[in-house]
Amino acid sequence: MVRLRDIVWLAAFAACLLTGCDSGPRTYPVSGTVTFDSKPVPAGRVDFWPDFSTGNDGPQGFAIIRDGAFDTRKGGQGHGGGPMIIKVEGFDGKSDNPQFFGTPIFNVYEIKRELPKELSVQNLEVPASAAAGLIVGKSKS
């Protein structure tokens, strides 16, 4: 005898097959380089925030910077594309604790950029002026 819950489960499975079982908004991978004062940033993080002021409300992405390079496909998360605010945090990479990046080398730097809704390479330059007024405390190691 066929039970109602079996019919519901089968209907949900069929609907999933027909629609592709999308688990959320589409994201797009991005990789690239990050330089500060024309030198590779040793360690840090890049965040990709949708620019809400333009009506973009897609998903936020992030990537870890290692030796001047980042890739959302390597321990990060892709972005939703469109107008984004890219926030860059850079550190000297000198820490005994692998969960910390060391001492900041500049203030959080923001870049507004239109990102494509496809795989892309974005090279980010943080100017020397981003270190102006930086208060360096003790490293979190």
Image: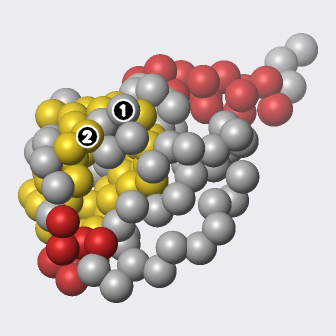
At 56% from the left edge and 52% from the top edge, which residue is drawn?
Answer: 102
Along the polypeptide, which appears first: circle 2 or circle 1? 2
User: Which residue is nearer to you in this view: 112 or 119?
Assistant: 112
| Residue 48: quadrant of the picture | bottom left
Residue 64 x/y as whole percent? 45, 41
Residue 40, which numbered label? 2
Q: How packed is label 2: few (under 14 Cα within 10 Å), some, or many (20 or more)?
A: some
Q: Nearer the viewer, residue 51 or 90?
A: 90
Q: Is residue 123 above or below residue 11?
A: below
Position of residue 76 measured from the top left corner of the image (x, y, whole percent)? 47, 38
Q: Which mark is residue 67?
A: 1
Which residue is painted at 40% across and 27% down in the image?
73
Amino acid bearing label 1: Asp
Residue 9 % position (x, y):
71, 28
C-beta proximity under 8 Å, tags 2 and 1: yes
Would residue 87 appear left or right of 116 to someone viewing this image?
right
Split into 4 quadrants, where in the image is the N terminus? top right
The answer to whether residue 106 shows anywhere in this view is yes
Distance between mark 2 and mark 1 Cα atoms: 6 Å
- Could you say where residue 24 lies in the image, as x and y percent from the top left? 46, 45
Q: In this orientation, which residue lies closer to the viewer: 56 or 88?
A: 88
Q: Secondary structure at mark 1?
A: loop
Furthest-top residue in this view = 1
135 sits to left or right of 38: right
**Residue at horizontal 82%, vertical 32%?**
5
The local secondary structure at tag 2 comes to strand
In the image, residue 129 sits, relative to residue 40, either above or below, namely below
